[in-house]
């Protein structure tokens, strides 16, 4: 019975970690990376679509991102979406068939802003982890009040969920540390 609480908590914690990792691919590090732009929402055909669903994104070299839309009529909408993204500060240019983005070298100030952004994203992930732990423990407490589980089982669940939280916090800290190192390289 107590495995159910752990499975639920772990799936929520895993989702928080995966979300953080996806978010970090969109944080600029001075090197060209398709992940910087692939989730940018572009208004095409009357709806918002992630860029990766309407174009091929490649990195021909370490400083260039190339976007090849599947429909050339979407080029201006893609350029506009990239230009309007304040977080990245990228400047796209188009030749009518493809969009190229030169990823500029980051200044020390920009690097520090990116590190701050990464830490904010990490804190959001940690909040999600704590919420998952809190929900699992509350569900177990309700089950204990309803006499579905014993006090000993409740104590074990609380201990197991807390150790699960610590495991995922360690993974988040490692992920953040790696990203910060990448950002601070000159």
Image (cartoon, rainbow, N blue to C red):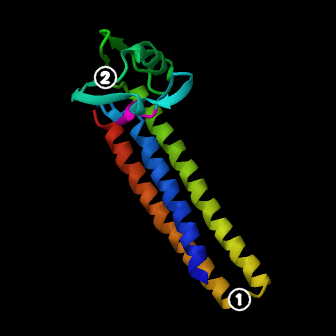
Does residue 97 appear to the left or right of 4 in the view shown? left
Stretch of the chain drawn in magenta = 35-39
Q: Is residue 32 magenta?
A: no
Please determine whether, in this image, residue 98 is positioned above or below residue 36. Answer: above
Does residue 128 appear to the left or right of 111 in the view shown? right
Residue placed at 35% from the left, 24% from the top?
70
Quadrant of res 129: bottom right
Q: Secondary structure at mark 1?
A: helix
Q: Give the labeled residue for mark 1.
A: 151
- Comparing labels 2 and 1, the label whose residue is closer to the camera: 2
**Relative image position of residue 105 (x, y in whole percent):** 31, 24
Q: Is residue 36 magenta?
A: yes
Residue 77 appearing in the image: yes
Residue placed at 79% from the left, 83% from the top?
146
Q: Nearer the viewer, residue 172 or 110?
A: 172
**Relative image position of residue 180 (x, y in whole percent):** 38, 43
């Amino acid at each position: 019975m107590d495995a159910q609480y752990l499975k639920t908590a772990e799936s929520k914690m895993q989702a928080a970690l995966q979300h953080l990792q996806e978010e970090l691919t969109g944080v600029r590090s001075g090197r060209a990376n398709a992940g910087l732009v692939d989730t940018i929402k572009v208004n095409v055909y009357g709806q918002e679509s992630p860029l990766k669903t309407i174009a091929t994104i490649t990195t021909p070299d370490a400083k260039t991102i190339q976007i090849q839309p599947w429909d050339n009529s979407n080029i201006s909408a893609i350029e506009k979406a990239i230009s309007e993204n304040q977080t990245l500060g990228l400047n796209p240019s188009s030749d009518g068939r493809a969009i190229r983005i030169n990823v500029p070298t980051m200044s020390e100030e920009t690097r520090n802003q990116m590190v701050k952004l990464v830490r904010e994203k990490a804190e959001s992930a940690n909040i999600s982890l704590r919420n998952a732990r809190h929900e699992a423990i509350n569900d177990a407490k309700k089950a204990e009040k309803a006499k579905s589980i014993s006090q000993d089982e409740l104590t074990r669940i609380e201990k197991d969920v807390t150790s699960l939280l610590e495991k995922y916090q360690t993974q988040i800290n490692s992920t953040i540390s790696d990203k910060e190192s990448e950002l601070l390289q000159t």
